[in-house]
Image (spheres, helix red, strand yellow):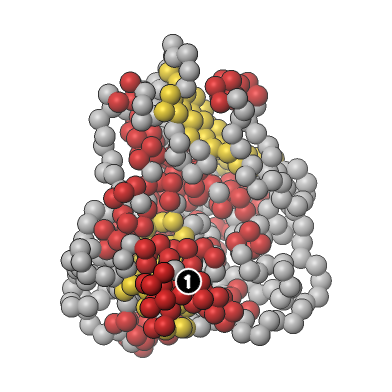
Amino acid sequence: MKGFRSWTRRAFLKVGSGLIGAGAGGTLLAASPAEFPSGPPPKHSPNNRLNLVLIGAGGRGRYLAAEALRQGENIVALCDVDAGQLTSARKFLSAQGEAGAQTAEKLRLYDDYRKLLDEAKLFDAVLVATGARWHAPISMAMMKAGKHVYCEKPLVRTLAEARQLAELARSSPVATQTGTQGCSAWSTRRAIDVLRAGLLGPIREVYLWCDFYGPNPASHSAPPGEDPIPAGLNWDFWLGPVPYRPYKSGLYHPGCLKFQNWLFMDNGMLAGQGAHTFPLAVLGLELGPPVRVETELPEPLQETYPSKAYFKFEFAGRGNQPPVTLWWTDGGRYPPEEVTQDLKTGLGKVPQGGLLFRGEKGQLYAGGWGGEGILKLAGDKKWRGVLDHEAAKEVPPRLPRAPGDNHMAEWFQACRSGPKPLTCFETGAQIAEVFLPGILALRLNRPIQWDAQHLRVPDAPEADQWIQNNYRTKWLI
């Protein structure tokens, strides 16, 4: 860790707070720029292993840790507020071959991410897999401590977090990566090249949909009462920055599919799967935030995401590109039949999810994670792979290829002073700023105009409560 001074929590608390809260009326607090440890981040030779910490030891986190071991990196500690998850994760890693068994014997276990900052010399980088309510607070804390950060999706919970995290990432010397793995598929990156090259002609319509998980239950509120908190689970800490709720067995915990639909913690399928599906549209069409969003509710909105969602996002023209309308549907609601008919004819059925670009000169479809791209231009008799179509082959590659098309490998390369990952935090936040205004339309249950510059719905000051963070600060740095 040459070039770094030793950081205790006490020293860390002296760091500029950055943009972490909201002032009166929801205005973002102006703060002095965040400071970082002196010197550049640590440089590692290709043969030098990174020391990693996993924060959030559930199923997704364990997969990330196992993948890091597979790529020859070193897991030195696990951190979780649920002792049961720590035990299970250690057992899981011990079964991952010789490297996993050796790792499990030496692992340090933590029940508080803040304690890691007292032992900053222990690790170089962090894997964050906690759930969206904790993603931005923990990621920002670790970045300010000079740690490289890989954070699972959804990267942020609020629009304020998206803006704050992007601003911090731009000034930070560390490597960041959003856990949207499909963005590292070569077919995804070639599809971005094809879209930017204008092969489809002007594009005014994009359809995104997801039916991988079936309809959600109708929007509902939590039942009354509470259950005993399981031994070893710090329930208050698990909730962290979001409003406190009594513990109810099986209602919120464990697993992302349980807490994802509770709107006080997350943003439902729009964020959960949308974080995977939107990147190709945002990057391929170089979209900024929408200017208008509308939605339809299948039932009255209560505390959870609706059973079937519908969003219509409208974007202004960009350069020589025309205005574009993007639709998102989920829970079994598909694009109109006349839109997907050609796709259905070519594939034999309409896929359960993905995104379809309709241009004046052709169409491009990709799967729900952005890969598996297929292309059909005017005059083509059938769909062709985006890597195989003759016209696509003529488009020069503009984006760098991830090592082995592996998402984590691209981040590890960046940690060793390699190129910035395509879906670094700046990009991840940009994508979040595209779909999160949909949640405001959902909450207000009406069309909205979106003022992205000032992070507000001009005629709805009540929307600020969902735009800003309004954190409970008990468990924050």
- The spot of residue 16 in percent (x, y) is 34, 75
Position of residue 102 in the picture relative to residue 433 (left or right): left
Which residue is more in the foreground, 455 or 338?
A: 338
- The spot of residue 353 in percent (x, y) is 58, 38
Residue 115: quarter of image: bottom left
Which residue is more in the foreground, 380 or 208?
A: 380
Query: Which quadrant is the N terminus positioned in?
Result: bottom left
Position of residue 103 in the picture relative to residue 230 (left or right): left
Residue 13 versus residue 220 in the image, above or below:
below
Residue 322 versus residue 256 in the image, above or below:
above
Q: Give the residue displayed 65% in from the left and 24% down from the top.
A: 337
- The spot of residue 58 in percent (x, y) is 54, 69
User: Is residue 311 something one can see in this rendering?
Assistant: no
Residue 470: quarter of image: bottom right
Q: Residue furthest top?
A: 379
| Circle 1 residues within 10 Å: few <14, some 14–19, many ≥20 | some
- The spot of residue 429 in percent (x, y) is 42, 54
Q: Give the residue displayed 49% in from the left and 47% down from the top.
A: 276
